[in-house]
């Protein structure tokens, strides 16, 4: 009797705040800090009445997640605080328009079991009677399935791997084998224009679809995402917009930098991102620069971009450029002389898009004029193309001109050999690279057999000295300069 009376007095002194505070102390010891911050700190205790604790949660999804993942823990802490008869009720904030809320809807949960999720009421969208609007569907067209918006040509099979993209490709392939189940979530792929970001991002989506046909994969450009959101606001369909994107299993957003300065769009994407990430869905993003350099993007989004992996795509090197061209003509069923492919690869160094554009232009010229593709035809067409797209000559091209002039294999120039004729050709290439490109001494040295900047400076001094003292050597330099200048 004494214990029962004490228990009654103790219960009378309890408040909803104290019960929830004591519960949080126990919960904190049983979940990691990130999950505690995400799933329990936002909860507010509302009232305590007749051994029933009412807590307010931010959304229907939030409630379902708690019931799915923390039901056992919640049952224990509530019974510890309120006894065997203790129960829990949820108050869920329901949205009527984005950024605004109606009065909370109280959800009475009779028992703390997973089955209680089936008793949830009043979702913002009645999916059965009023389907969520798909922002990719033109009004009037009836289509239930979500099209992935992926280009089948952008597959891993057509993506040429090289030193410039190996990390990003490996991470992307890992993601496609286990979407949402790797440490690469989100996977942010960044690099300058034309280096293959869109191709790689879509390759991931295509591979996920191949491996998991039942998963919903969606590729969308950031500008398209923004346009859709604006339309949703105009049509008072923000909830439809959000819920549509929350249904996606693998979401690929291209050119995320275009969200810069668009506060409302960033806000809605923040909530979509959180939802997808928390339920283990995969996010793949592309940008034209690393997260640290993304201006106009909210800090809370930038911090989430860093949760996974940021992998850069660099401008492809000579070998990769040649491989890309070989892959392209193989897929097209075309044969070209090796010397033509090499000339293209040496000449177009800016990015993959311009490299493929040059090849297409060459093929078009050959077809329209009914001419066989030769090195001479390639030079006539490509020289014009290069002059209009990339004025600066490349280190690779300089090396090719010098090696051709002295009849040396380019691999020999890049080797460690100390043969006199090779050393001299290497020094000449370094000299022209320093005077005719904007590359750093370290970059020049790296292209010339992994030499350091001091070696490059020594090479330039040696060439200048020989030009002053050796007329024959000076003639070499003048002739080589003309050959290189024809290109630029």
Image (cartoon, rainbow, N blue to C red):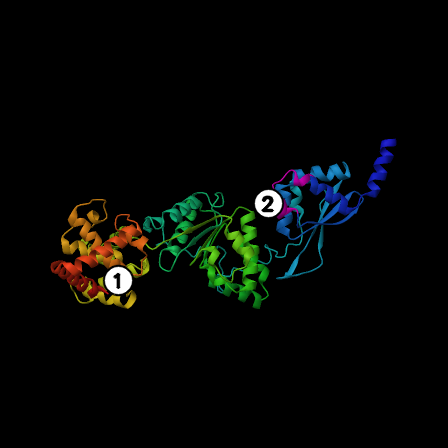
Residue 436, numbered label: 1
Report which quarter residue 153 is drawn in: bottom left
**Element at badge 2?**
helix
* Label drawn at residue 363: none
Picture quadrant where residue 372 is located = bottom left
- Marks 1 and 2, the one that precedes in the sequence: 2
- Count all numbered tags in the image, as a single digit: 2
Tag 2 residue = 34
Q: Residue at horizontal 43%, vertical 48%?
A: 209
Residue at the outermost left position: 472
Report the predominant secondary structure element of the magenta stretch.
Answer: helix
Which of the image's four quarters has the C terminus? bottom left
Nearer to us in this view, 306 or 369: 306
- Magenta segment: does it hold 37? yes
Residue 469 is situated, as x and y percent measured from the top left of the image, at 15, 59
Q: Residue 100 falls in which quadrant of the image?
A: bottom right
């Amino acid at each position: 009797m004494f214990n029962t009376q004490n228990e009654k007095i103790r219960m009378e002194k309890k408040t909803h705040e104290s019960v929830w505070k004591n519960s949080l102390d126990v919960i904190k010891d049983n979940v990691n800090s990130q999950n505690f911050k995400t799933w329990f700190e936002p909860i507010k205790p509302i009232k305590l009445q007749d051994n029933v604790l009412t807590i307010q949660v931010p959304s229907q999804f939030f409630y379902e997640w708690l019931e799915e993942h923390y039901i056992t823990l919640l049952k224990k802490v509530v019974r510890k605080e309120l006894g065997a008869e203790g129960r829990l009720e949820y108050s869920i904030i329901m949205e009527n328009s984005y950024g605004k809320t109606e009065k909370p809807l109280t959800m009475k949960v009779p028992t703390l079991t997973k089955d209680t999720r089936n008793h949830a009421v009043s979702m913002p969208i009645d999916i059965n009677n009023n389907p969520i609007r798909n922002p990719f569907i033109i009004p009037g067209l009836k289509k239930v399935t979500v099209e992935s918006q992926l280009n089948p040509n952008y597959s891993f099979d057509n993506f040429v791997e090289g030193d410039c993209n190996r990390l990003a490709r490996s991470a992307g392939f890992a993601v496609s084998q286990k979407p949402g189940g790797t440490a690469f979530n989100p996977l942010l792929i960044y690099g300058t224009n034309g280096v293959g970001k869109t191709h790689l991002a879509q390759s991931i989506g295509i591979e996920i679809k191949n491996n998991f046909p039942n998963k919903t994969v969606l590729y969308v450009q950031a500008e398209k995402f923004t346009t859709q959101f604006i339309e949703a606001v105009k049509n008072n369909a923000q909830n439809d917009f959000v819920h549509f994107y929350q249904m996606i299993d693998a979401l690929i957003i291209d050119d995320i930098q275009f969200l810069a300065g668009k506060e409302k769009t960033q806000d809605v994407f923040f909530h979509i991102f959180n939802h997808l990430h928390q339920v283990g869905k995969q996010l793949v993003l592309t940008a034209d620069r690393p997260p640290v350099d993304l201006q106009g993007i909210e800090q809370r989004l930038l911090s989430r971009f860093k949760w996974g992996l940021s992998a850069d795509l660099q401008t492809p090197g000579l070998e990769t450029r040649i491989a890309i061209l070989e892959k392209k003509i193989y897929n097209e069923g075309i044969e070209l002389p090796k010397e033509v492919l090499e000339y293209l690869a040496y000449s177009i160094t800016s990015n993959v898009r311009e490299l493929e554009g040059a090849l297409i232009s060459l093929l078009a010229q050959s077809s329209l004029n009914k001419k066989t593709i030769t090195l001479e035809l390639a030079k006539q067409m490509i020289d014009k193309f290069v002059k209009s797209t990339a004025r600066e000559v490349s280190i690779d091209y300089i090396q090719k001109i010098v090696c051709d002039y002295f009849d040396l294999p380019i691999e020999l120039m890049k080797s460690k050999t100390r043969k006199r004729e090779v050393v001299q050709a290497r020094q000449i290439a370094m000299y022209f690279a320093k005077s005719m490109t904007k590359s750093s001494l370290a970059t020049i040295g790296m292209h010339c057999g992994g030499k350091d900047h001091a070696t490059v400076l020594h090479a330039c001094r040696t060439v200048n000295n020989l030009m002053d003292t050796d007329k024959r050597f000076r003639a070499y330099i003048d002739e080589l300069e003309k050959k290189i200048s024809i290109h630029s």
